[in-house]
Image (spheres, rainbow, N blue to C red):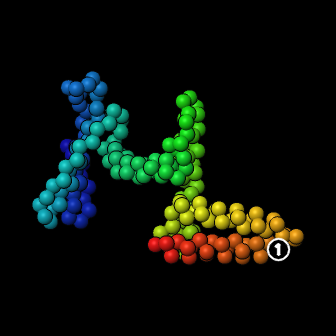
Amino acid sequence: MPRSHWEGPLETRYYQFQAWPKEFRVLLNVVCVVQVNHAHAKRAPVILFSDDLTLPAEQRVTYYSLRFQIEFNFRDAKQYWGLEDFMNISQTAVTHAANLALFMLNVSQVLLRPLRQTLTEASVLDLKAQARGYRYVEEILKLLPQTPEPHLMAAIMQQVAQLVARLKSFST
């Protein structure tokens, strides 16, 4: 008996069963999802497989829908945080490198939220440029005979952040 979920004219039916494929000897959890648009009389079937025999159909669909986000996260970890540059051969080193790259990806996403309020198209590269600008300002301020007051340093840092945003708007 299929399970159904209705949302307006769309009905989503879940069929779940276990099957032994001919090609290899592993029992699979098979989920058939059929989305029916009753307004247009159209069907959209999808078949999902898993070797986790205890996974419910709805959870399997949720996991499958997250696959693109997972792929994007790995792409960003490789592109921005050097995951592809790690030359490790031991399992521990590979695990540490992957965890560090994905951790930095998560930190960068948190740091990008406030930046995107003023610069909607801000990317990890903008975040890196901003951090580099902050570092340059700190180094320049160290050259002064007297360290500026904290509120003045915060104002200078804010100016640098706005400069990064303005430079970004000129380049696009």
Quadrant containing the N terminus in the rendered view: top left
Q: From this view, report whether residue 59 is shown above or below residue 40.
A: above
Q: From this view, report whether residue 42 is shown above or below residue 157.
A: above
- Name the residue rendered at 82%, 74% in the picture: 149
Give coordinates of residue 112: x percent, y percent.
55, 64
- Name the residue rendered at 68%, 65% in the picture: 134
The answer to whether one can see residue 36 in this image is yes
Q: From this view, report whether residue 26 is shown above or below residue 154.
A: above
Question: Looking at the image, which residue sits at the far left?
Answer: 41
Give coordinates of residue 36: x percent, y percent.
18, 56
Looking at the picture, tell me which residue is in the foreground, 116 or 160: 160
- Name the residue rendered at 58%, 34% in the picture: 93
Q: Is residue 76 left or right of residue 166?
A: left
Q: Is residue 15 left or right of residue 147?
A: left
Helix, strand or loop at mark 1: loop
Q: Is residue 158 left or right of residue 76?
A: right
- Characterize the local packing of mark 1: few (<14), some (14-19) or many (20 or more) Cα atoms within 10 angstroms: few
Give coordinates of residue 63: x percent, y percent.
37, 46
The answer to whether one can see residue 112 in this image is no
* Amino acid type of the residue tagged 1 in the rendering: Glu
The residue labelled by disc 1 is 149
The answer to which quarter of the image holds residue 135 is: bottom right
The answer to which quarter of the image holds residue 87 is: top right
- Name the residue rendered at 76%, 63% in the picture: 139
Give coordinates of residue 132: x percent, y percent.
65, 62
Looking at the picture, tell me which residue is in the foreground, 65 or 162: 162
